[in-house]
Image: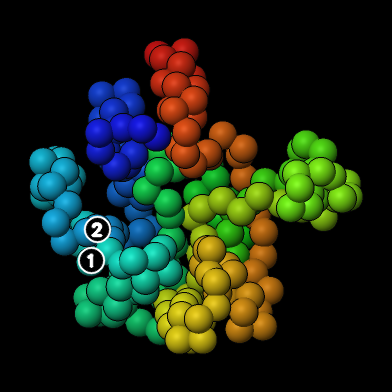
Amino acid sequence: MGADRPKQYLELAGKTILEHSLACFLDHPQLHGVVVSLALDDPYWPSLACAQDSRITRAEGGRERADSVLNGLQRLRELGAQEQDWVLVHDAARPNLSRADLELLLAELADDPVGGLLAVPARDTLKRVGADGRVLQTVDRSLIWQAYTPQMFRLGLLQRALAEALAAEVAITDESSAVEWLGQAPRLIEGRADNLKVTRPEDLDWLRQRWAERC
Protein backbone atom coordinates (compact mmCIF):
# COMPACT_ATOMS: atom_id res chain seq x y z
CA MET A 1 0.00 0.00 0.00
CA GLY A 2 2.98 2.33 0.40
CA ALA A 3 1.44 3.68 3.63
CA ASP A 4 3.00 4.70 6.94
CA ARG A 5 1.08 2.01 8.84
CA PRO A 6 -0.47 -1.44 8.28
CA LYS A 7 -3.35 -1.19 5.82
CA GLN A 8 -5.98 -2.26 8.37
CA TYR A 9 -5.34 1.00 10.21
CA LEU A 10 -5.82 3.27 7.22
CA GLU A 11 -8.81 5.61 7.36
CA LEU A 12 -12.09 4.90 5.61
CA ALA A 13 -15.16 7.07 6.21
CA GLY A 14 -13.94 8.35 9.55
CA LYS A 15 -12.81 5.01 11.00
CA THR A 16 -10.06 2.52 10.33
CA ILE A 17 -10.50 -0.34 7.90
CA LEU A 18 -10.25 -2.75 10.84
CA GLU A 19 -13.07 -1.05 12.72
CA HIS A 20 -15.35 -1.38 9.72
CA SER A 21 -14.33 -5.03 9.28
CA LEU A 22 -15.29 -5.77 12.89
CA ALA A 23 -18.56 -3.82 12.89
CA CYS A 24 -20.56 -6.30 10.80
CA PHE A 25 -19.83 -9.05 13.33
CA LEU A 26 -20.25 -7.02 16.51
CA ASP A 27 -23.73 -5.96 15.39
CA HIS A 28 -24.89 -9.55 14.80
CA PRO A 29 -26.94 -11.20 17.59
CA GLN A 30 -25.86 -14.79 16.75
CA LEU A 31 -22.18 -14.10 17.26
CA HIS A 32 -20.95 -14.46 20.82
CA GLY A 33 -17.58 -12.77 20.60
CA VAL A 34 -14.62 -11.79 18.47
CA VAL A 35 -10.91 -12.61 18.70
CA VAL A 36 -8.48 -10.31 16.91
CA SER A 37 -4.98 -11.65 16.22
CA LEU A 38 -2.42 -8.85 16.50
CA ALA A 39 1.32 -8.44 16.86
CA LEU A 40 2.30 -8.06 20.51
CA ASP A 41 3.93 -4.71 19.79
CA ASP A 42 1.05 -3.35 17.67
CA PRO A 43 1.01 0.38 18.54
CA TYR A 44 -2.24 1.26 16.76
CA TRP A 45 -4.82 -1.11 18.25
CA PRO A 46 -4.88 0.38 21.79
CA SER A 47 -5.92 3.77 20.38
CA LEU A 48 -9.12 2.41 18.80
CA ALA A 49 -12.38 2.69 20.71
CA CYS A 50 -13.22 -0.95 19.93
CA ALA A 51 -10.07 -2.08 21.76
CA GLN A 52 -12.06 -1.52 24.96
CA ASP A 53 -15.10 -3.49 23.76
CA SER A 54 -15.71 -6.39 26.15
CA ARG A 55 -16.85 -8.59 23.25
CA ILE A 56 -13.39 -8.44 21.65
CA THR A 57 -10.44 -10.49 22.88
CA ARG A 58 -6.91 -10.13 21.62
CA ALA A 59 -4.68 -13.03 20.55
CA GLU A 60 -1.06 -12.98 19.49
CA GLY A 61 -0.49 -12.79 15.76
CA GLY A 62 1.83 -15.28 14.07
CA ARG A 63 4.38 -15.31 11.27
CA GLU A 64 1.83 -16.43 8.68
CA ARG A 65 -1.95 -16.18 8.40
CA ALA A 66 -2.41 -19.80 9.49
CA ASP A 67 -0.35 -19.19 12.65
CA SER A 68 -2.45 -16.16 13.55
CA VAL A 69 -5.72 -18.02 13.01
CA LEU A 70 -4.50 -20.99 15.03
CA ASN A 71 -3.59 -18.67 17.90
CA GLY A 72 -7.05 -17.13 17.68
CA LEU A 73 -8.71 -20.54 17.83
CA GLN A 74 -6.67 -21.48 20.88
CA ARG A 75 -7.78 -18.25 22.54
CA LEU A 76 -11.40 -19.22 21.83
CA ARG A 77 -10.76 -22.57 23.53
CA GLU A 78 -9.43 -20.74 26.58
CA LEU A 79 -12.61 -18.65 26.63
CA GLY A 80 -14.78 -21.77 26.71
CA ALA A 81 -15.58 -22.41 23.04
CA GLN A 82 -16.38 -26.04 22.29
CA GLU A 83 -15.31 -28.52 19.58
CA GLN A 84 -18.53 -28.20 17.56
CA ASP A 85 -18.94 -24.44 17.82
CA TRP A 86 -18.93 -22.58 14.53
CA VAL A 87 -16.12 -20.08 14.00
CA LEU A 88 -15.85 -17.51 11.23
CA VAL A 89 -12.48 -16.24 10.04
CA HIS A 90 -12.47 -12.86 8.32
CA ASP A 91 -9.72 -10.76 6.75
CA ALA A 92 -9.05 -7.56 8.67
CA ALA A 93 -8.75 -5.75 5.33
CA ARG A 94 -12.26 -6.63 4.09
CA PRO A 95 -14.33 -3.72 5.46
CA ASN A 96 -17.21 -3.97 3.00
CA LEU A 97 -18.82 -7.26 4.09
CA SER A 98 -22.58 -6.84 3.81
CA ARG A 99 -24.97 -7.96 6.53
CA ALA A 100 -26.92 -9.86 3.87
CA ASP A 101 -23.85 -11.91 2.91
CA LEU A 102 -23.11 -12.70 6.54
CA GLU A 103 -26.71 -13.79 7.09
CA LEU A 104 -26.59 -15.93 3.95
CA LEU A 105 -23.39 -17.69 5.02
CA LEU A 106 -24.75 -18.44 8.50
CA ALA A 107 -28.06 -19.73 7.15
CA GLU A 108 -26.67 -21.86 4.32
CA LEU A 109 -23.98 -23.54 6.41
CA ALA A 110 -25.89 -23.97 9.67
CA ASP A 111 -26.35 -27.72 9.14
CA ASP A 112 -23.46 -28.36 6.76
CA PRO A 113 -21.22 -31.28 7.76
CA VAL A 114 -18.03 -29.48 6.68
CA GLY A 115 -18.51 -25.71 6.48
CA GLY A 116 -17.56 -23.32 3.73
CA LEU A 117 -16.85 -19.80 2.65
CA LEU A 118 -18.08 -16.81 0.73
CA ALA A 119 -16.79 -16.82 -2.83
CA VAL A 120 -17.40 -15.17 -6.20
CA PRO A 121 -17.34 -16.84 -9.63
CA ALA A 122 -14.55 -15.62 -11.91
CA ARG A 123 -15.92 -13.08 -14.37
CA ASP A 124 -12.93 -12.36 -16.58
CA THR A 125 -11.11 -14.54 -19.07
CA LEU A 126 -8.32 -16.36 -17.22
CA LYS A 127 -4.91 -17.22 -18.64
CA ARG A 128 -2.30 -19.70 -17.45
CA VAL A 129 1.16 -18.36 -18.20
CA GLY A 130 4.67 -19.72 -18.38
CA ALA A 131 7.82 -18.46 -16.69
CA ASP A 132 8.46 -16.24 -19.73
CA GLY A 133 5.15 -14.41 -19.22
CA ARG A 134 3.54 -15.85 -22.34
CA VAL A 135 0.14 -17.52 -22.39
CA LEU A 136 0.13 -21.30 -22.17
CA GLN A 137 -3.60 -21.83 -21.97
CA THR A 138 -6.97 -20.13 -21.54
CA VAL A 139 -8.56 -21.56 -18.41
CA ASP A 140 -12.25 -22.49 -18.26
CA ARG A 141 -13.50 -19.75 -15.95
CA SER A 142 -16.76 -21.60 -15.21
CA LEU A 143 -14.70 -23.85 -12.93
CA ILE A 144 -12.90 -21.03 -11.10
CA TRP A 145 -14.12 -19.08 -8.07
CA GLN A 146 -12.38 -16.40 -6.02
CA ALA A 147 -12.23 -17.28 -2.33
CA TYR A 148 -13.43 -14.52 0.00
CA THR A 149 -14.09 -14.34 3.72
CA PRO A 150 -15.68 -15.01 6.15
CA GLN A 151 -14.79 -18.70 6.05
CA MET A 152 -16.91 -20.77 8.45
CA PHE A 153 -15.94 -24.09 10.04
CA ARG A 154 -16.37 -26.00 13.28
CA LEU A 155 -13.71 -25.04 15.81
CA GLY A 156 -12.33 -28.55 16.28
CA LEU A 157 -12.12 -29.34 12.57
CA LEU A 158 -10.41 -26.08 11.67
CA GLN A 159 -7.97 -26.24 14.56
CA ARG A 160 -6.93 -29.77 13.63
CA ALA A 161 -6.67 -28.94 9.93
CA LEU A 162 -4.43 -25.92 10.51
CA ALA A 163 -2.24 -27.60 13.12
CA GLU A 164 -1.65 -30.73 11.04
CA ALA A 165 -1.06 -28.78 7.82
CA LEU A 166 1.49 -26.52 9.51
CA ALA A 167 3.25 -29.53 11.06
CA ALA A 168 3.45 -31.11 7.61
CA GLU A 169 4.76 -27.82 6.15
CA VAL A 170 1.89 -27.63 3.70
CA ALA A 171 1.33 -24.25 2.03
CA ILE A 172 -1.91 -22.90 3.54
CA THR A 173 -3.34 -19.83 1.85
CA ASP A 174 -6.70 -19.76 3.64
CA GLU A 175 -8.72 -21.81 6.12
CA SER A 176 -10.51 -23.70 3.37
CA SER A 177 -7.21 -24.94 1.93
CA ALA A 178 -6.32 -26.47 5.31
CA VAL A 179 -9.68 -28.24 5.52
CA GLU A 180 -9.29 -29.39 1.90
CA TRP A 181 -5.90 -30.86 2.82
CA LEU A 182 -7.71 -33.07 5.35
CA GLY A 183 -9.75 -34.48 2.47
CA GLN A 184 -12.91 -32.44 3.11
CA ALA A 185 -14.81 -30.41 0.51
CA PRO A 186 -15.94 -27.01 1.83
CA ARG A 187 -19.03 -25.48 0.28
CA LEU A 188 -18.90 -22.24 -1.70
CA ILE A 189 -21.59 -19.66 -0.96
CA GLU A 190 -21.84 -16.98 -3.62
CA GLY A 191 -21.47 -13.52 -2.12
CA ARG A 192 -21.11 -9.97 -3.34
CA ALA A 193 -18.08 -9.09 -5.45
CA ASP A 194 -17.63 -5.78 -3.59
CA ASN A 195 -16.56 -7.63 -0.43
CA LEU A 196 -13.06 -6.87 -1.64
CA LYS A 197 -9.78 -7.13 0.25
CA VAL A 198 -7.89 -3.85 0.35
CA THR A 199 -4.57 -4.74 -1.25
CA ARG A 200 -3.68 -1.75 -3.42
CA PRO A 201 -4.23 2.01 -3.03
CA GLU A 202 -6.87 1.93 -5.77
CA ASP A 203 -8.94 -0.54 -3.71
CA LEU A 204 -9.16 1.97 -0.89
CA ASP A 205 -9.86 4.82 -3.31
CA TRP A 206 -12.72 2.82 -4.83
CA LEU A 207 -14.24 2.11 -1.41
CA ARG A 208 -13.97 5.74 -0.34
CA GLN A 209 -15.76 6.85 -3.50
CA ARG A 210 -18.38 4.12 -3.18
CA TRP A 211 -19.11 4.94 0.44
CA ALA A 212 -19.26 8.68 -0.29
CA GLU A 213 -21.91 8.03 -2.93
CA ARG A 214 -24.06 6.22 -0.34
CA CYS A 215 -24.20 9.29 1.91
Foreground pick, 105 / 179: 179
Whichever of callouts 1 and 2 sits on the residue coming sooner in the sequence is 2
Q: How many marks?
A: 2
Query: Mark 1 is on which residue type?
Result: Ala
Whole-percent x, y for residue 135 in the image: 84, 44
Q: Are marks 1 and 2 in contact (CB under 8 Å)?
A: yes
Foreground pick, 36 / 56: 36
In 3D space, how far apart are the residues under numbered discs 1 and 2 (Cα atoms)? 6 Å
Q: Is residue 172 above or below residue 200?
A: below
Say whether residue 157 is visible.
Answer: no
Task: Assign the N terminus to one quadrant of the image.
Answer: top left
| Secondary structure of residue under mark 2 | strand
Which residue is rendered at x = 55% and y = 72% of the image? 171
Whole-percent x, y for residue 81 in the image: 31, 77
Whole-percent x, y for residue 20 in the image: 33, 38
Side of 4 relative to 197 (left or right): left
Q: Which mark is residue 125?
A: none
Say whether residue 137 is visible.
Answer: yes
Circle 2 packing at 10 Å, graded few (<14), some (14-19), many (20+), is some
Side of 46 relative to 171 (left or right): left
| Secondary structure of residue under mark 1 | strand
Which residue is rendered at x = 50% and y = 81% of the image? 169
Foreground pick, 206 / 23: 206
Task: Assign the C terminus to one quadrant of the image.
Answer: top left
Q: Which residue is mark 1?
A: 59
Query: Mark 2 is on which residue type?
Result: Leu
Q: Which mark is residue 38?
A: 2
Which residue is rendered at x = 22% and y = 59% of the image? 39
Q: How is the image coloured?
A: rainbow
Whole-percent x, y for residue 78 in the image: 22, 80
